[in-house]
């Protein structure tokens, strides 16, 4: 089902395999913790009926930003609120990158923000509030 | 990968197979247009690493509410904004149901709301703004 | 500055004066705790430059829904996330009513929802996540 | 009602008086179009019952970001969706500044984002979707 031609890792990224049933179906993503970035290549399993990136796949990618960029494997920070603005479509083959910011961490809450882009063009803006499970307050 | 024991259709629902790569991976959902309801059974492919319903799977289900409950197959209403409050976890085997309301339709926009529940217990609240593609204004 | 003709209390409501500088400027609101409703009459001090209800005044009214409908005077539940969909304009003289639901209360969080309407016509949809300050979990 | 000691304009800003009843009550704000910034000083009329910045006043300020930073006086871009994450309180006397970004403009829609801060400390994160009334698409 997946296209075999997209195998090269984008420069600066490491391969990351998400755990759990839904993460496995989503497929591999790329992480760059040093720059607080995360990415994936839009493949057949991420598409909507009009061959663009599915809104749910975008939300899934964004919801994983916190885990990939900031938490340790033994942490689980459940999502409280997730808000996504869809600004432009993405299509199969696009490398979708998220610049992730952790804006505020309290004892109980984590406030995240992501700007998602293809190249330099922003395609989505998102924010999430998570329950904190061990990230030091800042 | 999927559990075979969950085959019975919940009363009042019809089976619905979502199109497109991401919808196919998500698996079958249930729709009840007469009551503006949609449902699915949490299976292995919807789970997060702690064996609960993945936040991205929840968002995917909600993002499909408009299509399943209100649009014709030839319509495509792209998502502009999607907001989800996660209020309680769901676990594998749960029947997750959404009561969907179309609160306002203008020439250009559709405003939706979903209350997602397991039995009578609300587990998520969501709203979406979509670009209108042919739904009559109301 | 305020119009004097709008003095009759809508049936079922009690007068409520919000405390604090911003609440005082907003002016009196109406509450009906038994039915979890809150209301106000759009007056000159709530208008935007085109003589409609100001988006910020709408947000202010909604942000107060939790306090007016659910908390005791000695509680203060700070807002964590507030999301408003503006579906139709309101104009000076309109009685704006909010049907408020408390969907979930945990030890730390309160999840609210409001449907705001003029008569039976919905004009806004909103949700808020608040830090819990003493409301019993449900 | 207003404190007289806060009269100095912050460096780089011009004074801006918002029109309409609600804008007049809010009081003067500061704009810096060259740097896409907007600011105001928290005064008595912006406070909540615990003497902090009222959540509705914060939302009002943010909802005005688009008008102050990007539109001409003859434009009116109605708000479709406004989402605010409240990350830290602000108190009377604080200079509250918003760094505003216009992430995407289509023929019909404008996508905005604001990071609100006191000094260098972020206190709120917000996004808005507006109906476009004459801003060139980008």
Image (cartoon, coloured by chain):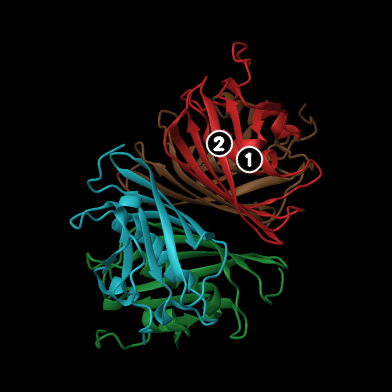
Chain colours: A green, B cyan, C red, D brown
Residue placed at 56% from the left, 43% from the top? D62
Residue D73, placed above or below residue C125: above
Q: Which of the labelled discs sits on residue C65, or is there none? A: 1
Would you call the spot at circle 1 few (<14 residues within 10 Å), some (14-19), or many (20 or more)?
Answer: many
Residue C112, placed above or below residue B47: above
Q: Secondary structure at mark 2?
A: strand
- The location of residue D38, given as percent across then percent down, is 58, 43
Residues tagged 1 and 2 counted as in contact (Cβ below 8 A): yes
Tell me the quarter of the image containing the N terminus of chain A.
bottom left
Q: Nearer the viewer, residue B95 or C49?
A: B95
Q: Which residue is mark 2?
A: C98
- The location of residue D97, given as percent across then percent down, is 63, 47
Q: Nearer the viewer, residue C14 or A105?
A: C14
Count how many numbered circles sit on residues in the image. 2
Q: Chain of mark 2?
A: C
Residue placed at 79% from the left, 31% from the top? D3
Q: Residue furthest top?
A: C5
Pick whichever of labels 1 and 2 is earlier in the sequence. 1
């Amino acid at each position: 089902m997946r296209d075999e031609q997209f195998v090269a890792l984008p420069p600066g990224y490491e391969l990351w395999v998400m755990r759990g049933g839904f993460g496995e179906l989503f497929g591999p993503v790329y992480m760059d913790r040093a720059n607080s970035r995360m990415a994936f290549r839009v493949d057949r399993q991420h598409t909507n009926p009009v061959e663009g990136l599915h809104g749910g796949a975008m939300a899934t990618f964004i919801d994983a930003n916190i885990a990939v960029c900031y938490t340790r494997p033994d942490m689980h920070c459940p999502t409280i609120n997730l808000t996504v603005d869809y600004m432009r479509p993405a299509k199969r083959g696009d490398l979708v990158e998220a610049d992730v910011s952790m804006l505020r961490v309290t004892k109980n809450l984590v406030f995240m923000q992501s700007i998602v882009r293809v190249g330099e063009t922003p395609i989505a803006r998102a924010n999430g509030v998570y329950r904190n499970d061990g990230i030091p307050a800042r």
